[in-house]
Amino acid sequence: MMVSDVEATTTAPALDIDALRRDFPILQRRIHGKPLVYFDNAATSQKPQVVIDCLDNYYKHYNSNIHRGVHTLSQEATAAYEGARHKIQHFLNAKSPKEIVFVRGTTEAINLVANSYGRTNIGQDDEIILSEMEHHANIVPWQLLCEQTGAKLKIIPINDQGELLLDKYAELFTPKTKLVAIVHVSNALGTINPIQSMVKIAHQHGVPVLVDGAQATPHMKVDVQALDCDFYTLSSHKMYGPTGVGALYVRQSILEDMPPYQGGGEMIQWVTFEKTTFNEIPFRFEAGTMPIADAIAFGTAIDYLQSIGLDRISQREQALLHYAEQQAADFPGLRIIGTAQHKASILSFLLDSIHAHDVGTILDNEGIAIRTGHHCAMPVMQHFHVPATARASFSFYNTFAEIDQLFEALHKVREVFAR
Ligand code: C6P
């Protein structure tokens, strides 16, 4: 069964997938003599030509340091960098650009919050609520904070579909709870968590909520005002932008009171050997020379995503996921890890008792790139009593024919191991 790639899954005009694929030069590559099938989008997405051109144009025409030059190049670079901040603000529907801090990515964003907000507001015997499906980036910074302060972690359990047990979540709150830090979309399972209702419960207890949005923002519309969350993190490289840059949204009233995380140039107002006063938000959190070109190209990636439309991207990716899950359901020896009712386009699976790395290696020989391993989410693997999974993660630019190729190649994997 083959589904057309120029189908109307919605009343909006259908996406022209062939044309979109031409935006991504790397999709023309061959791997081991076969056309590349790129199913490792959750690790990092590929980059469209407009993003590559944006970087090229910056270095060719206005490379300069920002916020510190009176000369033309510096003013152009500053305008483009601050323009990118505005694009992220509008993308997330934040109230003000002051609420957007440029960081290296989600990992740095969470470390910033743990070290700045955490060290100021979380102390001995206080409690931080996380979930069993967190990426290590949303576990380890909190563990380090707990070691430094004597605070404790409390964990929301998951069921065998890979969904949070929300009744257990509600029971975890005590007067000592100081923060909830929760993933929007699980990178290991694909589960989409009900952030809005989770934030509501936390706020009823007066507890702020950080949302790890690394895997959500490439796939769905995110509105931080509608979610009512207090912190939201995103990584450019998963959103068709460059590596090395991302953003942290913080509600303005909270950010105003947060102390600096790193000291250095740019983040200061006045420095003497006796005392330093700090710059206003968000600049107080952007010490040193930032990844200027990458931040600007992150803005271009956001323009690109919005030109396609997040609704159409969601619909397309849901159709791909549904198609893959149907094939997986009928596939001998295949077990899907993560069968939540609401999922993003991630298919984690095991095949017979074949190690995921062997599956990944044989698929690579067929030109198919997937990720294998624990996906930096070891507690999820522990829940399912597996060391690793194979993970295919789909982007709008993937095709139904590529999914057919995946399952044909999985038959080959079984044949190799049947010998
Ligand atoms: N997940 C994956 O293959 P950085 O590396 O800072 O941009 O993002 C870290 C991160 C945080 N949270 C979630 C839910 C993530 O998925 C990731 C990155 C990649 O799944 C690399 S481990």
Image: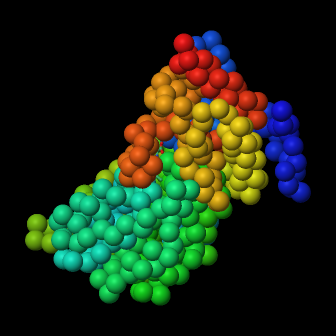
Q: Residue at x 33, y 78 (%)?
A: 178
Q: Give how far across and how far down residue 312 sits, in percent.
A: 76, 53
**Residue 353 in view in this figure:** yes
* Residue 267 sits above or below residue 407 on the image: below
Q: Residue at x 26, y 61 (%)?
A: 143
Determine which quarter of the picture holds residue 264.
bottom left
Determine which quarter of the picture holds residue 287.
bottom left
* Residue 60 sits above or below residue 126 on the image: above
Q: Quadrant of the N terminus?
A: top right
Q: Residue at x 39, y 77 (%)?
A: 172
Left or right? Give the position of 104 relative to 117.
Answer: right
Q: Residue at x 42, y 80 (%)?
A: 171
Q: Nearer the viewer, residue 170 or 346?
A: 170
Q: Give how far across and how far down residue 292 sits, in percent.
A: 45, 48
Q: Quadrant of the C terminus?
A: top right
Left or right? Give the position of 232 relative to 219.
Answer: left
Determine which quarter of the picture holds residue 410.
top right
Q: Nearer the viewer, residue 266 or 225?
A: 225
Q: Give how far across and how far down residue 413 sits, in percent.
A: 58, 21
Kindly give the residue lying farthest to the left in the view shown.
274
Left or right? Give the position of 292 relative to 302.
Answer: left
Left or right? Give the position of 193 relative to 256.
Answer: right
Q: Give how far across and how far down residue 353 sits, in percent.
A: 49, 31
Q: Nearer the viewer, residue 292 or 259?
A: 259
* Residue 87 sits above or below residue 175 on the image: above
Q: Nearer the viewer, residue 183 or 296?
A: 183
